[in-house]
Amino acid sequence: MLYSEIKKQHLQKGHMKRIEKALDFQYITVHNTANPTSTAKNERDWLDNPQNNNTTGWHIAIDEIEAIEAIPITEIAYHAGDGKNGTGNTKSIGIEICESGNYAKTEQNAIELITSILIDKGWSTDRVKPHKHWSGKQCPRIILPYWDDFIKRIDEEVKRQKNKEVSSWAVDAMKWAIEKGITDGNRPKDVATREEIWTMLYRMRNVK
């Protein structure tokens, strides 16, 4: 799931959880919702519930089906538990990973989302932090026991996504090769085997 695919359902300006101060976006903070029945939709609905009367918020909630942005990632949200001037709150976005349904799919969606942001920003996974990093809270409670593996999976997804990208200088050549039936355009940065080279040359024999 890419950042461009999330649903933007922003809290209205003036909402107590929408701080409306500019975020110096430097990090991504990962949370679990600590609610085994949570979905992105009901997490979003809870923000507007009158009983939810504190300033704690988040930027994005994600489940197995969708991701919802409640506070723009250009604005501060109090999610990290390190105070109004803490680095977690003032320099990171909070991503809430829901715990209901197919959790493995939800977590993979979160990995893909985080990856898309890292690639867009040109960042590495040292910018991805658990909630615990900022406040000491045991969060994300599901992921913490295998945090290193979670980061490794993001690194692998970054490599996979980058391998699908075509360098700007090769775009025209790729389009020509696809149009002529020489290649399908997949795996643009992979090393070609001799068999693949032979096949591409063979396909070129009638190219005009």
Image (cartoon, grey):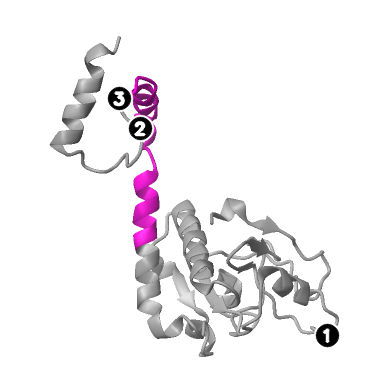
Q: Disc 2 marks which residue?
A: 184
Whether residues under marks 1 and 3 lie with C-beta atoms below 8 angstroms apart, the answer is no
Q: Position of residue 180 (x, y in %)?
A: 35, 19
Instruction: Read off the residue under disc 3.
Output: 182
Dot 1: element: loop
Q: Amino acid at mark 1?
A: Gln
Q: Position of residue 197 (x, y in %)?
A: 18, 31
The quadrant where residue 84 appears: bottom right
Q: Badge 1 is on which residue? A: 51
Distance, label 2 to label 1, CA atoms, is 55 Å
Nearest the eye: 23 or 188:
188
Query: Residue at 37% across / 26% down in the picture?
Result: 178
Helix, strand or loop at disc 2? loop
Residue 168 belongs to the span the image colors magenta: yes
Cα–Cα gap, marks 2 and 3:
7 Å
The three-letter code of the residue at mark 2 reads: Asp
The dominant secondary structure in magenta is helix
Q: Nearer the viewer, mark 1 or mark 3?
A: 3
Question: Horizontally, is 95 left or right of 10 in the view?
Answer: left
Which stretch did the figure color magenta? 156-182
Residue at image position (82%, 64%) is 12
Alpha-carbon distance for marks 1 and 3? Answer: 62 Å
Check the image and name the residue furthest to the front. Answer: 101
